[in-house]
Image (cartoon, helix red, strand yellow):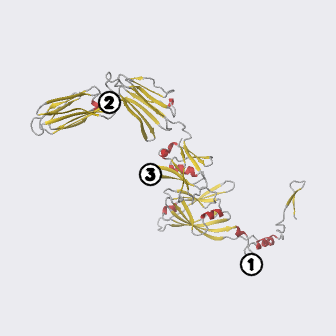
Amino acid sequence: MATKQQSTPSEISFKLVNNTNSNILMSFLSNPSNLQDISNQFTEYSWNITSIAGNLSTYDTIILTFGNGSSVTTTIQQKTLDGIIIALNQLGVSSFYYDIVGGSTFIKTYNDVQAFTTLEILSSTAVTSVQLFYSVNTQFSSTGDVTIDNGGTFNTGILSNPQSVPTTNATSLILLGDNISVNGNSPTIGSDINVGINVLVRETIGASITTLIDNNYYGTFFLENFTLSNNNASYSVAVGYVSLDANYSVLTTSTNGSVSIDYGQPSVPIWLNPTTQNADYTTAISAGQLVQVSGVAPNSGGVLTIRIRIRRQDLANGTITTLYDNTYSSGASFNDSFTIALGYAYQILVTDL
Amino acid sequence: MPIFNAVVTIQPIPAVSVQTIGEPSYQDIRKSLGDFVYKAYQVYLSSPNLQQLNGIVQFKKYDVNGSTTIFDIVPVVSPYQQQNTLFLQMNRNDVIINGQDSLQFILLANTTLLFKLYSQQISKESFVGNDGKELLGQSNFKAFETATGIFNFFEDFNNNIEWQQSNNPLQVKFRSN
């Protein structure tokens, strides 16, 4: 006779509610030692990983530290947010999920039993992958010089103007954390009127490009510094001449008279009134170029007065200075001229009064 | 290498709440697993979110040796069904909920799921007789003696037992008071 065993039919109903905006791995109907069952728990742990959320492809390892200081390591197989969650959940120490709130990305879990402190997400293979590129283009200057260096292994030496160094990879000469110096002398105003010096430093991480330095110098010593601070970033240093900026606008309604703007082009047009003209002549000029705004004021029919305004803006501080604001009437001839100088943008406006 | 510090907050509501309909509570059921064992043969699922019923359920078993066995229970929702409910038959005989296992599945965001477990429950009580004539459990020992033909098997059950080691360390004998 066998020992009698009895079983009874059982019918248990559970109501499960996910109160979050994220899908959560449920580990259901196990004994209380199962830390992965996070139901009915109130202690939330949240890690803001927004800074790397857009660039997860380079990370393959997670180190999760517990409240007692010990830690566990897991490997990311799928380099996405879902992959991070899968990797964390494989640890079996809680049920993790991610939450995106207002553009910020959080890894979260709830656990009243197990405490957590830090979450480290790292790349085990690419310990240092910072890159540095530089280029110099000062072909239109005959004075001044440029030096780029890290104070040690990387030093371009003094590159005297005019200079043309194509984009050069200096990655093998630098390390993450190096401080890079870009210094020298910008072209001397007066003796070298062609260009100033522009120092442009950019940091690229994935698809994100950040301009660290974008400064112009005219006739002075210049010194810029930046640090190769971000792993997996690419840094570019471009030293080049400063572009000038110039444009004109002519709008007259009189039935006679004329306007002409001569900035050294081979054939200078004479526009008979009424006329409408707009152009950007930046690329056609260089520093030292004489620009002449000339013509004849109208003497009959419609508006008889023409107004010539010529302004320039200091690119260093934004200050706008009016060089000319003249009116000419009744057939008077006019010729307002100025010379393009370094570090300024120019604008010519010709209108009826 | 980015290191992120945890922000710890005590929230007023849990991320996931599990409640039973009536008593005992879910926490009590979890604590009693092992003493109470459930052999599942059917699960009823109901959710306003039909997609929730489609997810694969993993049954994860492990033993004291650390061996883990995982098998999938795949719900099949008819594309023509109107109700957001599903009876999930356990076609395997080893879906036994004893505490050393768990049902794993994804609970979708902002989703409610009614999970009704139909099972045979076995407890310690199930292993002792209850013929309604004697006190619970006593007749089972008698039945055992009758079945084995060894009477008074439990005669010394409550006596102290001393171990006496003879010259041969493999030989031990009992001495009762």
Instruction: Give x and y (percent) for residue A86.
Output: 55, 51
Instruction: Give x and y (percent) for residue A39.
Output: 57, 59
- Local packing at callout 2 (Cα closer than 10 Å; few below 14, some 14-19, many 20+) is many
Front-most of B74 and A184? A184
Instruction: Give x and y (percent) for residue A78.
Output: 53, 48
Q: Earlier in the sequence, mark 3 or mark 2?
A: 3
| Residue named by callout 1 | B133
Is residue A56 rendered to the left or right of residue A341? right
Marking on residue A343: 2
Q: Quadrant of residue A203?
A: top left
Spatial separation of the CA atoms under disc 3 and disc 2: 42 Å
Hey, what amino acid is under mark 3? Gly
Q: Secondary structure at mark 1?
A: loop
Instruction: Give x and y (percent) for residue B21.
Output: 57, 69
Q: Quadrant of residue B102?
A: bottom right
Q: Are marks 1 and 3 on the same chain?
A: no
Is residue A315 rendered to the left or right of residue A290? right
- Local packing at callout 1 (Cα closer than 10 Å; few below 14, some 14-19, many 20+) is few
Q: Which residue is depicted at the point 89% across and 54% down?
A: B168
Hey, what amino acid is under mark 1? Lys
Spatial separation of the CA atoms under disc 1 and disc 3: 70 Å
When the figure is inspected, residue A34 is found, relative to residue B82, above or below; the finding is: above
The chain letter under disc 2 is A
The nearer-to-camera label among 1 and 2 is 2
The chain letter under disc 1 is B
Which residue appears farthest toward the left when viewing the image? A300
Is residue B127 rendered to the left or right of residue A237? right
- Check the picture and name the quadrant holding the C terminus of chain A: top left
| Residue named by callout 3 | A102
Q: Are marks 3 and 2 on the same chain?
A: yes
